[in-house]
Amino acid sequence: MKRNDEERQLTKAIMDVLWNAPKAGLTTHQIIEQYPEPKPAYSTIATFLKILTNKSFIHPRKLEGGGKTFVFAPLITREAYTNRVMKEVKSTFFAGSFKSMLSFFAQHEEVSEEDLQEIMEMIKK
């Protein structure tokens, strides 16, 4: 797997953990606890938390009475994040064409007749 794919998967995994967490957020150790074995290294998660903070996806705040410990909470909803990623996919792989993107998925995914009917109904609305 390419490094960018691994980075995207780790970024999404961290965001999934934070979206499913209490609104107050989680510490780095609490995020790591959510992972199955083998758990990622603390430094790896800390690096990605810094990247996500710089991209304004998450917000760190000092844990009250926790010394240097930070709690991380999402600044972006799952829906807004998905929208952003899908726009990037459309722009990067389909020259910004929704029609091309939809055509690709229609041709390469196993879409049932029922699903196609539902999609057509959504488009009509």
Image (cartoon, rainbow, N blue to C red):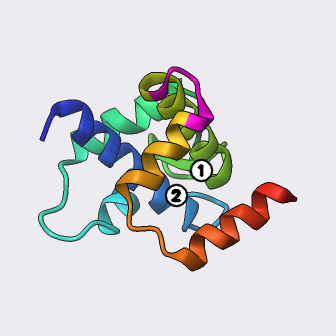
Q: Is residue 117 left or right of residue 122?
A: left
Q: Quadrant of the N terminus?
A: top left
Locate residue 20, reporting x and y percent.
55, 68
Residue farthest right in this picture: 125
- The answer to whether any part of residue 3 appears in the image is yes
Q: How many marks?
A: 2
Amino acid beneath label 1: Ala
The image's mark for residue 93 is none
The image's mark for residue 73 is 1
Residue 99 or 29: which is nearer the viewer?
Answer: 99
Q: Is residue 45 magenta?
A: no
Locate residue 13, reporting x and y percent.
38, 55
Q: Is residue 37 left or right of residue 23?
A: left
Q: Quadrant of residue 30?
A: bottom left
Which residue lies at the image location 38% right of the left edge and 43% below the top edge? 11
Q: Is residue 103 left or right of residue 87?
A: left
Q: Local crowd at mark 1 within 10 Å, few (<14), some, or many (≥20)?
A: many
Q: Is residue 63 left or right of residue 76?
A: left
Which residue lies at the image location 22% right of the left edge and 70% below the top edge? 36
Q: Label 1 near label 2: C-beta < 8 Å?
A: yes
Q: Which of pointers 2 and 1 lies earlier in the amino acid sequence?
A: 2
Q: Quadrant of residue 8?
A: top left
Magenta segment: 94-99
Q: Local crowd at mark 2 within 10 Å, few (<14), some, or many (≥20)?
A: many
Q: Quadrant of the C terminus?
A: bottom right
Amino acid beneath label 2: Leu
Residue 104 or 34: which is nearer the viewer?
Answer: 104
The image's mark for residue 18 is 2
